Image (spheres, helix red, strand yellow):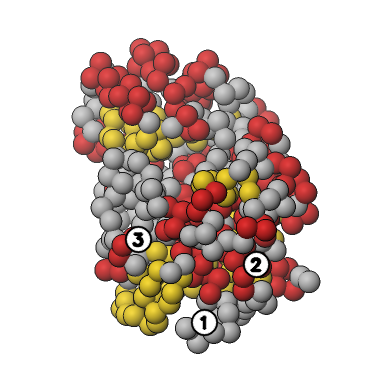
Amino acid sequence: MQVLFVTSEAFPLIKTGGLADVSGALPKAMKSLAEFNGDIKILIPAYRGLLDQLIDAKPIASIQALKQSCILFSGQLPDSDVEVIAIQNDSLYDRIGGPYTDENGNDWSDNALRFGVLSRVASLLTRLDSPLPWQPDLVHCNDWQTGLTPAYMKLLDQVSAKSIFSVHNMAYQGNFNSDVMSQLELPLAHFKINGFEFYHQVSFMKAGLFYADQLSTVSPTYANEIQTESYGFGLQGLLKLRSLDLTGILNGIDTQAWNPSIDPHLIKHYSSKNIRGKKGIKKDLQRKLGLNADENAPLLGVVSRLAYQKGLDLLAPIIPQLVAEGCQIAILGSGEKALENTFLQLQQQYPDAISVTIGYNEPISHAIMAGADLFIMPSRFEPCGLNQLYGLAYGTPPIVSATGGLVDSVRDTNTDSIKHHTATGFVLKDITDASLLETIQTAITYWQDKKTWRKIQNNGMKTEVSWLSSAHLYLQLYQKTISSA
């Protein structure tokens, strides 16, 4: 089985969110399976500085895609045996800013072409006249940036390779004005409802959903949710039609990068058998963030995009009440400027109790995950979520809403779940600020009972959160897709 894993980001090369973590970890997990007899390679654009991070990067071929001249580089993903094929085209990818936006946060105006080229190159590598000696049997596409790949494979190339399209977040669909069709070399005859047309636009997401042989998404609950009007973002009808082709597989985490017993970002290490080091990490984190070094103050952690989806606008209005009750809050993230400013103002108001770090910082994210007592994640929708899994692994029980992968991975704490050793966190009854406050208060009551709290932590830390079981499910999906007519 030869698999081409197509993605717009992969940790540690380039990261804006959970897609990067999945793209960096799943191929490694697949290669580690004894049952996986074959190879899996990652295809990604060569953004500025990416080639420098690959091990032994070297040019291996040139290729024309959508009238763009590209050079393919091959190298190894750091700390793994996974090969990365990077598409070098400096005019498209070598830019100051992020993979999708400029330094001011505005979408690149030519994103349709940039990710059209990614998709086109992926499809060309499945053809007999591919410039590479290696050819995939299966192309695993991820999110809208790769959505045209199955369309190119079906409409232009008519290759024997099969495709899977994975939805990581339905909210981001890659919809563009119809005038990009000629640039993307898409046939006009398929600009229709049974094709890639979506409300008079070209939709990369819809193309992936319509043309791929099989579909997947990142949790069983989210697979059901996206077939409803509330979560389908206009594509729920298509997803219902393809429900038999849709599989929900909960993400795992990289337990080498996220393991409190070996984490290089922590000043102390700990495990479920000996958790004492967590107390020292909390004290050090409080000092570094300018908070009072008070072990009796419940420390609430947030590592997130600051966006409406994440429900963190519900946290802001209850912070004065939480501070009055003795809580501290450590926030790391960036996103909507209004929310960033709200949290920064609260930090000025309560400098000893609130810490806000705008931006992304890997060491701080690990320190918050380990040093916090509770992790706050009240998302309005969450396809899978990884931070709640980090919270489980780090003995930092998550407070989550009952949606997507959050409800699939966190077991609410109550009398019964404590008795049956299944309690791992706390689930909101409603996605409101009142419910969030009530849930935090309930969690703190349990936190004050150290014996019970230790049981909750232990349950979470013993939960299987690695990619092992998920990789087996993906292998089954790969086999099903390749063997399908």
As measured in the structure, the alpha-carbon distance from the residue carrying label 1 to the one carrying label 2 is: 17 Å
Label 1's element? Answer: loop
Residue type of the residue flagged with mark 2: Leu
Please give the name of the residue rendered at 47% of the width and 22% of the height, measured from the top-left corner: 314
Type of residue at label 1? Ser
Asked which secondary structure carries label 2, the reply is helix
- For image coordinates 63% across by 28% down, the residue present is 414
Inspect the image, locate mark 3, and give the three-letter code of the amino acid beneath it: Leu
Establish if 483 lies above or below 251.
below
Disc 1 marks which residue? 130
Answer with mark 2 or mark 3, whichever residue precedes in sequence.
Answer: 3
Query: Is residue 25 visible in the rendered structure shown here?
Result: no
Image-based side of 23 in relation to 38, left or right: left
Residue 92: assigned label = 3
The mark found on residue 155 in the picture is 2
In depth, the one of 401 and 53 nearer the eye is 53
Residue 256 position (above or below residue 78): above
> Can I make out residue 185 in this image?
yes
**Quadrant of the image containing the C terminus:** bottom right
